[in-house]
DNA sequence: AGGCGATCCTGAGGGC
DNA sequence: TGCCCTCAGGATCGCC
């Protein structure tokens, strides 16, 4: 469920971990973790000296001052929560808490990082080398927050798939999900069924600008919370207030007052305004 | 190549 | 109140 802005807000809320040391790890659900060895699967990132938490698209990575990398994907319902540990007693396991790390921070306090994911569409993957991690990351296209118009145009020129489908393909563009895809297409006045390779450079430029602006503003609002999303401090965001089309099928368009259309496209609910987004005429 | 369906799961919300 | 059905912010795989 979290898309790029939500994942970035989680990343920022984990900043106190940078420079910290992983003192212990407890895995409650081993099938939530993949790793190159059974030992690492049982104790992912044990003993790591944390260099930083980084992000590409919707994927986070815990990077140690050593060869290991932990890829963290939140799927639809994943959360990463950090909170201080007062005293020696560890808090009780939360429902669907699959892994917890005890971290001694650079500031000298002790915190708990917990991975919680009810639906388990997310996952945790340990890589034993920077090279293996980088190879995995090559699946992903450019980060949507900084995508260049010319780059996006080149990637869309090679496919006839509907633009809505292409935007959701993380190999084309990393970070856009169902909410921001619909919002960006509305903002740039592009019909979701438009074949990607039929978008001219000015249209792709409007789209790229809309994607960057919407994601940036959503981050500033702390992300979009429809139901589950919370950052690492368990705080919801407020970007849902700015949504113009997502979840509004059948309701009036904010721009022209016409009725917003909705249909399934690529197995995802897609909402658009057939008056404002006319780049393809329905047959 | 790409469209489609199934799959992995749990929980919230609506209708009756 | 309770039960059943539908839907959900994601990603992958196999089949045609």
Image: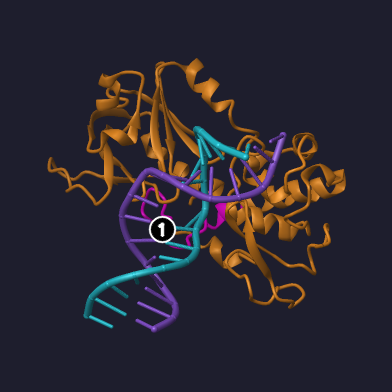
Chain colours: A orange, B purple, C cyan
Q: Quarter-wise, where is residue A273 in the image? A: bottom right
Q: Quarter-wise, where is residue A248 in the image? A: bottom right
Coordinates of residue C9 in the picture (x, y in percent)? 52, 53
- What secondary structure prevails in the magenta region? loop
Coordinates of residue A95 in the picture (x, y in percent)? 24, 52
Q: In the picture shown, does residue B5 fall above or below A247?
A: above
Crowding near pointer 1: few (<14 within 10 Å), some, many (20+)?
A: few
Quadrant into which the C terminus of chain A falls:
bottom right
Is residue A245 among the parts visible in the rendering? yes
Q: Residue at x 27, y 41 (%)?
A: A98
Tag 1, which secondary structure? loop
Question: Which of A244/A242 is in front?
Answer: A244
Q: In the picture shown, does residue A130 fall above or below A151?
A: above
How many marks can you see? 1
Give, as a single range, the part of the protein colored magenta.
Answer: A216-234
Q: In the picture shown, does residue B2 fall above or below C9?
A: above
Question: Which of A74/A163 is in front?
Answer: A163
Coordinates of residue A30 in the picture (x, y in percent)? 27, 33
Question: Which of A234/A143 is in front?
Answer: A143
Q: Residue at x 80, y 46 (%)?
A: A204
Chain ID, mark 1:
A
| Residue under numbered circle 1 | A228
Lateral position of residue A242 relative to residue A70, left or right: right
Lateral position of residue A101 relative to residue A212, left or right: left
Coordinates of residue A213 in the picture (x, y in percent)? 68, 52
Residue A222 belongs to the span the image colors magenta: yes
Q: Quarter-wise, where is residue A104 in the image? A: top left
Residue A169 belongs to the span the image colors magenta: no
Q: Residue at x 64, y 76 (%)?
A: A251
Lateral position of residue A165 relative to residue A55, left or right: right
């Amino acid at each position: 469920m979290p898309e790029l802005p939500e994942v970035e807000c989680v990343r920022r809320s984990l900043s106190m971990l940078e420079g910290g040391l992983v003192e212990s790890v407890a895995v409650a659900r081993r099938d939530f973790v993949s790793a190159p060895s059974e030992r690492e699967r049982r104790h992912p990132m044990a003993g790591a000296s944390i260099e930083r938490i980084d992000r590409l698209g919707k994927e986070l990575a815990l990077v140690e001052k050593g060869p290991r990398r932990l890829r963290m994907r939140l799927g639809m319902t994943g959360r990463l929560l950090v909170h201080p540990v007062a005293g020696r007693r560890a808090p009780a396991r939360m429902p669907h808490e699959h892994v917890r790390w005890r971290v001694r921070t650079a500031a000298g306090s002790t915190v708990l990082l917990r991975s919680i994911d009810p639906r388990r569409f997310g996952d945790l993957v340990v890589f034993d080398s920077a090279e293996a991690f980088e190879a995995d990351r090559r699946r992903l296209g450019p980060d949507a927050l900084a995508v260049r118009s010319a780059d996006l145009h080149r990637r869309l020129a090679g496919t006839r798939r509907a633009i809505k489908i292409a935007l959701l393909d993380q190999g084309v563009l990393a970070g856009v999900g169902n909410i921001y895809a619909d919002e960006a297409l509305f903002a740039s006045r592009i019909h979701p069924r438009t074949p990607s390779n039929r978008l001219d450079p000015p249209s792709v430029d409007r789209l790229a600008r809309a994607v960057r602006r919407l994601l940036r503003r959503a981050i500033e609002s702390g992300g979009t919370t429809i139901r589950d999303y919370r950052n690492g401090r368990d705080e919801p965001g407020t970007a849902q207030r700015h949504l113009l089309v997502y979840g509004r099928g059948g309701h009036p368009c904010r721009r022209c007052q016409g009725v917003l259309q909705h249909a399934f496209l690529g197995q995802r609910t897609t909402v658009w305004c057939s008056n404002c987004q006319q780049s393809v005429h329905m047959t």
